[in-house]
Image: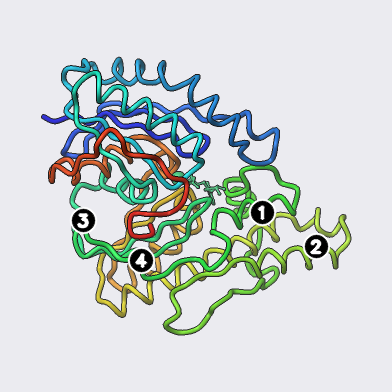
Amino acid sequence: MNAILAFESSCDDTGVAIVDTDYNILANVVSTQLDHSLFGGVLPELASRLHLKNIVYLTEAAFKQSKLSPAEISAVAVSINPGLIGSLIVGLSFAKSLAWSWEKPLITVNHMLAHIFANFLEHKSIQPPLLALVVSGGHTELVYFSTLTDFEIVGKTLDDAAGETFDKTAKLLDLGYPGGPIIDSLARKGNPEFFHFPRALNRKNNFNFSYSGLKTAVLEYLSRHKPEYIEEHKADLAASIQQAIIDPLINKTLTWARQNHIKTILLAGGVAANSALRIQLSEKASRLNIQVFYPSVSLCMDNAAMVGAAAVPKFLHQQFSSLDVNAFSTKGTRNL
Ligand code: KG4
Ligand code: ZN
């Protein structure tokens, strides 16, 4: 058995995991930095400091959970982009120091690719070709995989990401942060057809997304109605906004899959936890004889097990990084 020790520190969750090369999770611990909710968003400097505070004891906890010793680890994996640069540097520096002192190979991983690979931890039979819909706080991408290591972005957001839109519209409705899970649960009590917010780029064969107009439409709607009316219809508005966010995700994903004869769709990223998106995409896909996979809710959120999973094909192909590799905040690895 080969075991990979993996680190995730790209945003506000510090994660440490140990995953084997058959995608089994041997340990998975995450510390979510709740301190940021005071600020209505992630405070980068605070995030780096909290990663630094948490990473050592989380590593000890991961070893304890797995009952493995450092000598039984075959490689050290870490996410190096995209993300908050100060936060990424904490995880990378720690991973490098362990790889160097234990003389283990270092594997660097793209965070968005890691989200997609979270699916393999629970559904080991998944085989390419497949289409992945990656939806998170900073990303909205449709990615076609011809093999596990060959992929191409076939659609992406031109402005705001889906998760960002959940967060920003929740802020406009004064619901709190992060907005996605709050809108998700409020929407269950509301009517998604209460108000029709715009769906942008709603043209055939356009696989890009755009959400900045939706944010403006919500702002305009709120300015045109009395606070008491908004309060009374909060659940209806949450359901209507949620539907306007997920409709383009569902329609474009299924259209691309159908046109390109894809029978497997993977949902990934924080927004993949959205209950309406999971249900509606699966139902519509099954009518087209397409199978949809998504990770359990805890593995949709940032965690290190998904980083370990994305490191598996790299480990098997011996794609190791040198110890002078740098983290970078922007997209990379063929723009994922
Ligand atoms: O993947 P993630 O944990 O961090 C990034 O890599 O960005 O995603 C966080 C995003 C946030 O925007 C959050 O509001 C959204 O995922 N999110 C949800 C749900 N749970 C988290 N959005 C909609 N419905 C949810 N249940
Ligand atoms: Zn993420």
Mark 4 crowd level (few <14, some 14–19, many ≥20, 10 Å Cα):
some
Between marks 3 and 1, how big is the CA–CA gap?
34 Å
Residue 65, placed above or below residue 312: above
- Which residue is identified by label 3? 148
Q: Name the residue type under label 1.
A: Lys
Mark 3 crowd level (few <14, some 14–19, many ≥20, 10 Å Cα):
some
Q: x%, y% of residue 145?
A: 25, 63
Q: Assign the C terminus to one quadrant of the image.
A: bottom left
**Circles 1 and 2 in contact, beta carbons < 8 Å:** no
Q: Name the residue type under label 4.
A: Ile
Q: Secondary structure at mark 2?
A: helix
Mark 1 vs mark 2: give the one in front: 1
- Which residue is identified by label 4? 153
The image's colour scheme reads rainbow
Queried on whether the Cβ of the residue with tag 4 lies below 8 angstroms from ligand 1, the answer reads no
- Which residue is identified by label 2? 222
Task: In this rendered view, identify the residue nearer to me: 46 or 191.
Answer: 46
Q: Assign the N terminus to one quadrant of the image.
A: top left
Q: x%, y% of residue 41?
A: 64, 41
Q: x%, y% of residue 147?
A: 19, 60
Of the image marks 3 and 2, the number of the one nearer the N terminus: 3
